[in-house]
C-alpha cells in the first residue's frame, strides 16, 4: 500500500472518535487533580491542615496560566484540587475539538501546577456544555456550595483527628452528624467557622 493510501486510511481511523463541542452553548472545562489525596497527605505531609496557603496559591497560579495559554477563557474558579474554566460565548479555540481541548488543557494545567507547587501534579479534564446563562450561574453556585460543604467537613475532620481519633473514626463521624452538629463541634473547640478565610470556604474566582 502506498503511503498516501495508508495515510488516508489511518487518518480515517484517527478521526472516527472526533467530537466537536456545540458552538451555541456556554462551555466550562473542569479540571480535577488525579491522586491529589496521596499528594497532599503522603508526599507533602507537612502541609498546613485543613488548608494550606501554598497549595492554594499553586492552584490560583494554574488558573492564571490557563488564562494565558491560548484558550478563550473569561472566568476561572478553583476550590480544593479542582478548576472550572468558563469559555467566552462563541469561542472557537481548536475549532472546539473535544480531544484537543481536553488533552491540552490537562497538559497545561499539570505542567503549570507542577512548576508552581514543586511536586508533580496531574489533572484530568472534562468539557461541560451549558445551555444558557442561568445554567452557568447554577453551575458555579453548585461548585461553591460543594466547596463550602467540603470545607466544613475538612475543619471537623482535622479537629477530630487532633482529638486523637483515627482517620477511619473521623470519616465515620462525618457521615453520621448534621451540618449544625459539625458547626457546634467547631464552636466547642474555639473555631468560628463563619469567620474562617473566604477562600477556604468558597474557593477563589478570577476574571480574565
Image (cartoon, grey):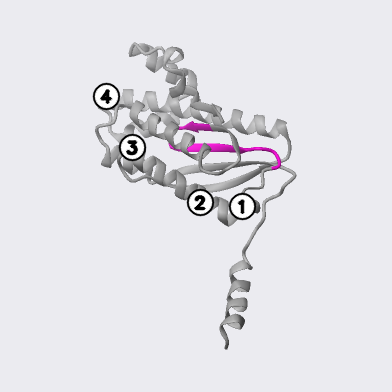
Residue density around tag 1, few if under 14, some if 14–19, many if 20 or more, within 10 Å:
few
- Name the chief secondary structure element in magenta: strand
Residue for badge 2: 104
Residue density around tag 4, few if under 14, some if 14–19, many if 20 or more, within 10 Å:
few
Q: Secondary structure at mark 2?
A: helix
In whole angstroms, how far apart are the C-alphas of marks 2 and 4? 41 Å
Q: Is residue 9 above or below residue 200?
A: below
Image mark for residue 117: 3
Q: Is residue 121 left or right of residue 63?
A: left
Q: Are marks 3 and 1 in contact (CB under 8 Å)?
A: no
Q: Looking at the picture, how far across and down is residue 57, in whole percent?
A: 39, 29
Residue density around tag 3, few if under 14, some if 14–19, many if 20 or more, within 10 Å:
some
The quarter of the picture where the C terminus appears is top right
Q: Is residue 80 visible?
A: no
In whole angstroms, how far apart are the C-alphas of marks 4 and 1? 49 Å
Q: Which residues are magenta?
A: 77-90
Residue for badge 4: 162
* Residue that appears at 39% across and 28% down: 154
In whole angstroms, how far apart are the C-alphas of marks 3 and 1? 29 Å
* Residue that appears at 32% across and 43% down: 38
Q: Is residue 153 above or below residue 99?
A: above
Residue for badge 1: 94
* Labels 4, 3: front one: 3
Q: Secondary structure at mark 1?
A: helix
* Residue that appears at 66% across and 47% down: 92
In whole angstroms, how far apart are the C-alphas of marks 2 and 1? 10 Å
Q: Looking at the picture, how far across and down is residue 139, in whole percent?
A: 62, 34
Q: Nearer the viewer, residue 68 or 13?
A: 68
Q: Is residue 16 above or below residue 126?
A: below
Amino acid at each position: 500500500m502506498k503511503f498516501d493510501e495508508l495515510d488516508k486510511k489511518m487518518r480515517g481511523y484517527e478521526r472516527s472518535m472526533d467530537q466537536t463541542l456545540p458552538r451555541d452553548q456556554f462551555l466550562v472545562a473542569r479540571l480535577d487533580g488525579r491522586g491529589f489525596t496521596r499528594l497532599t497527605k503522603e508526599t507533602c505531609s507537612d502541609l498546613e491542615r485543613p488548608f494550606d496557603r501554598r497549595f492554594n496559591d499553586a492552584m490560583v497560579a494554574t488558573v492564571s496560566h490557563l488564562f494565558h495559554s491560548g484558550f478563550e477563557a473569561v472566568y476561572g474558579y478553583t476550590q480544593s484540587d479542582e478548576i472550572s474554566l468558563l469559555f467566552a460565548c462563541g469561542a472557537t479555540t481548536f475549532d472546539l475539538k473535544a480531544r484537543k481541548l481536553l488533552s491540552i488543557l490537562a497538559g497545561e494545567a499539570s505542567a503549570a501546577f507542577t512548576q508552581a507547587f514543586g511536586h508533580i501534579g496531574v489533572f484530568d479534564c472534562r468539557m461541560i456544555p451549558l445551555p444558557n446563562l442561568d445554567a452557568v450561574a447554577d453551575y458555579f453556585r453548585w461548585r461553591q456550595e460543594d466547596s463550602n460543604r467540603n470545607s466544613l467537613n475538612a475543619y471537623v475532620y482535622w479537629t477530630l483527628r487532633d482529638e486523637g481519633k483515627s482517620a477511619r473514626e473521623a470519616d465515620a463521624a462525618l457521615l453520621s452528624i448534621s451540618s449544625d452538629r459539625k458547626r457546634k463541634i467547631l464552636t466547642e473547640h474555639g473555631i468560628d467557622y463563619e469567620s474562617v478565610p473566604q477562600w477556604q470556604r468558597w474557593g477563589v474566582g478570577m476574571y480574565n
